[in-house]
């Protein structure tokens, strides 16, 4: 047996390289069923971040549907989602470059069905009776004005009719099986869809207009998620009225709870079309729910309300789509990368249709997640997932403890996941521990936990990240002098706050993070333009709080190096926020690196940029923490550095 080599943490040579992560890994997205055919979308970093639609037919033959140069993606709410639908083999999709809707018959070139205007479309369904698409529309035609969101019906020759207007946001238009009624969600500023939404139902009249509308559920303090019609004409939906997202049914004016669990059957609607359940038949729902960070698949009998677990090896399950006898979903686990999976409900046999990567890594290089609960500020409990260093070929000197990267997720309503992530294993296989924090405000622990962040953004999240790091230090697990924090978007804000207002961390990496809350309140897209009112307070009435919690206003308190990454076409967190922070550190004389990316938006999609950001972050840590790299990495410019 070969003895492991002794090398310092951070210096271990790993087979999990950036080339492996980017060149051979794809993102698996939306799933659609059309008869016996299964469709899904694939984000391909190696093809300039393009998203294509892929089809598997009844004979299990897989083919790309989207021809060059089309890129299937919508920019509604900037985050997009539900960007295509399939009807009897015909695909309708949103093209990223012009945001027009296209119709594509099998083996033909796509044809535009909407005009060349600054209008975006998403979350569409097909109305067979009237031969039209009903979808969310977002009108950007008038510069300087907030975009107008509506529900519209689109004829296949380009004619358009507004069905519902007057609210700030719409989502989830869903048609009853007989085509006579429509259900949909609405919400208004300053709420986000996980704060308060309303569920409406209306009749589709003979002329195609909508009449006799009524609100059937929801209010400003109740979040409704994913309305669906059963084949017998009843409306189902997920609500957090109990404090947890559970399943409900509306019929004859009454609402009935189908599940009553301290579990989450829903998720934050950052991306349109998110699906946690689907009808296998009128009396059977296949659903997924999470408890303590783990997702489960189950079958719900809608006549008895009995919930039966369906055994799977997965801990992350999403995108559920069912039809008679089978269910298709995205799934992953601590040892399995994300895949499109089909479950035969009669035999309970699982079949992987597509993996996000064909790479297999020896388990000896994989760090398994360790869920932890730990005490945080004000006597509260918070949650995190710890990944210790792991590489079968190496061990560290006995007296050395590993550095740790505390990861602060985005959203801030997202959640740390236990699924296999090569991005996390990139660090752990090199000898750097990772602590993925589910700070107060995260999803998966009920509405009350999610609302811990109300009025406390920049405080509760920072406390929970700091206390998580100190918990590991006090347990003797990591090196208290080599604590790093990294985050993107809202997690980037948490990162900057932790580095500015606390002295726990020695270095940070900020990916397109918020540094100026006032600038964000004044210059961001519609979907999030009033989000800060709940997280911080009303603006400009509480301008002082915005200033107090903006890292850009307190750079005098910074005392550690930071590396910044920014997409130059980012509309969510504009580049000027990052550039202002970089300039402040340059003036202060702190070590700082800035890596901008042309053509990238909020999050990086191109392989070369994902590769560069990971390698640059590793290079930065190696210089700050003084460990040798096991492989050559292109150096980056670090300003104000003594080395």
Image: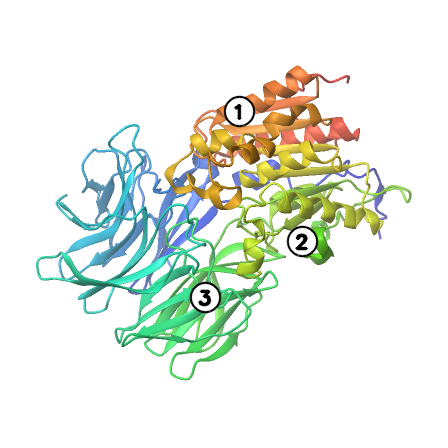
The secondary structure type at the circle numbered 2 is strand
Q: Position of residue 643 (x, y in %)?
A: 77, 18
C-alpha distance separating marks 1 and 2:
30 Å
Number of other residues with Cα within 10 Å of mark 1, as a class: few under 14, some 14 to 19, many 20 or more = some
Residue 217, compared with residue 411, is above or below; it is: below
Q: Nearer the viewer, residue 427 or 515?
A: 515
| Residue 33 in view | no
The residue pinned by badge 3 equals 241
Number of other residues with Cα within 10 Å of mark 3, as a class: few under 14, some 14 to 19, many 20 or more = some
The residue pinned by badge 1 equals 596
Farthest residue toward the right? Answer: 399
The secondary structure type at the circle numbered 1 is strand
Mark with earlier residue (1, 2): 2
Mark with earlier residue (2, 3): 3
C-alpha distance separating marks 1 and 3:
43 Å
Mark with earlier residue (1, 3): 3
Describe residue 345's horizontal placement relative to residue 385 as left or right: left
Looking at the rendered image, the disc whose residue lies closer to the viewer, 1 or 3, is: 3
The residue pinned by badge 2 equals 384
Q: Residue at x 35, y 79 (%)?
A: 283
C-alpha distance separating marks 2 and 3:
26 Å
Residue 597, compared with residue 463, is above or below; it is: above
């Amino acid at each position: 047996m070969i003895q492991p080599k002794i090398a310092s943490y951070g210096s271990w040579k790993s087979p999990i390289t950036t080339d492996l992560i980017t060149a051979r890994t794809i993102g698996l997205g939306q799933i659609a069923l059309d008869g016996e055919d299964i469709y899904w979308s694939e984000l391909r970093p190696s093809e300039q971040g393009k998203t294509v639609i892929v089809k598997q037919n009844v004979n299990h033959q897989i083919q790309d549907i989207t021809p060059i140069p089309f890129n299937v993606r919508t920019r509604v709410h900037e985050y997009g989602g539900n960007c295509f639908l399939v009807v009897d083999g015909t695909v309708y999709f949103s093209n990223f470059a012009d945001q027009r809707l296209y119709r594509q018959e099998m083996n033909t070139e796509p044809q535009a069905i909407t005009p060349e205007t600054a209008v975006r479309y998403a979350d569409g369904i097909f109305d067979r009776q009237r031969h039209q698409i009903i979808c969310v529309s977002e009108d950007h035609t008038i510069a300087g004005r907030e975009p107008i969101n509506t529900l519209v019906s689109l004829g296949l020759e380009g004619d358009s009719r507004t069905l519902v207007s007057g609210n700030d946001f719409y989502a989830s238009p869903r048609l009853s099986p007989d085509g006579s009624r429509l259900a949909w969600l609405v919400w208004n500023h300053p709420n986000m869809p996980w704060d308060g939404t309303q569920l409406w139902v209306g009749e589709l009249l003979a002329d195609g207009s909508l009449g006799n509308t009524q609100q059937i559920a929801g209010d400003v303090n109740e979040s409704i998620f994913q309305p669906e019609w059963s084949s017998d004409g009843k409306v189902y939906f997920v609500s957090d009225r109990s404090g947890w997202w559970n399943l409900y049914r509306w019929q004859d004016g009454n609402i009935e709870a189908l599940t009553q669990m301290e579990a989450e059957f829903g998720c934050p609607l950052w991306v349109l079309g998110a699906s946690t359940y689907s009808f296998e038949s009128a009396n059977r729902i296949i659903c997924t729910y999470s408890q303590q960070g783990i997702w489960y698949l189950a079958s719900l009998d809608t006549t008895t309300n009995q919930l039966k677990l369906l055994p799977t090896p997965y801990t992350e399950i999403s995108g559920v789509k069912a039809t008679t006898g089978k269910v298709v979903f995205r799934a992953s686990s601590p040892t399995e990368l994300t895949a499109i999976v089909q479950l035969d409900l009669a035999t309970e046999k699982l079949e992987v249709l597509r993996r996000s990567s064909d790479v297999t890594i020896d388990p000896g290089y994989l760090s398994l997640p360790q869920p932890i609960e730990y005490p945080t500020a004000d006597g509260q409990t918070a949650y995190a997932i710890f990944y210790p260093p792991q590489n079968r070929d190496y061990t560290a000197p006995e007296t050395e403890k590993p550095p740790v990267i505390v990861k602060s997720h985005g959203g801030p309503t997202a959640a740390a996941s236990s699924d296999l992530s090569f991005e996390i294993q990139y660090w752990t296989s090199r000898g750097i521990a990772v602590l993925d924090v589910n700070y107060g405000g995260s999803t998966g622990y009920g509405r009350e936990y999610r609302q811990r962040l109300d009025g406390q953004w920049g405080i509760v999240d920072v406390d929970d990240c700091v206390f998580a790091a100190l918990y590991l230090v006090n347990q003797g697990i990591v090196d208290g002098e080599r604590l790093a924090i990294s985050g993107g978007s809202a997690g980037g804000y948490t990162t900057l706050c932790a580095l500015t207002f606390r002295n726990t961390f020695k270095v940070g990496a900020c990916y397109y993070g918020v540094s100026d809350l006032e600038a964000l309140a004044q210059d961001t897209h519609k979907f999030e333009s009033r989000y800060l009112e709940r997280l911080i307070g009303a603006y400009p009435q509480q301008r002082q709080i915005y200033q107090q919690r903006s890292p850009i206003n307190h750079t005098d308190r910074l005392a550690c190096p930071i590396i910044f990454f920014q997409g130059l076409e980012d509309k969510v967190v504009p580049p000027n926020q990052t550039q202002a922070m970089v300039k402040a550190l340059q003036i202060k004389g702190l070590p700082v690196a800035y890596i901008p990316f042309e053509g990238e938006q909020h999050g990086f999609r191109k392989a070369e940029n994902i590769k560069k950001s990971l390698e640059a972050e590793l290079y930065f840590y190696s210089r700050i923490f003084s460990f040798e790299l096991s492989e050559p990495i292109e150096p980056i410019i670090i300003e104000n550095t003594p080395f």
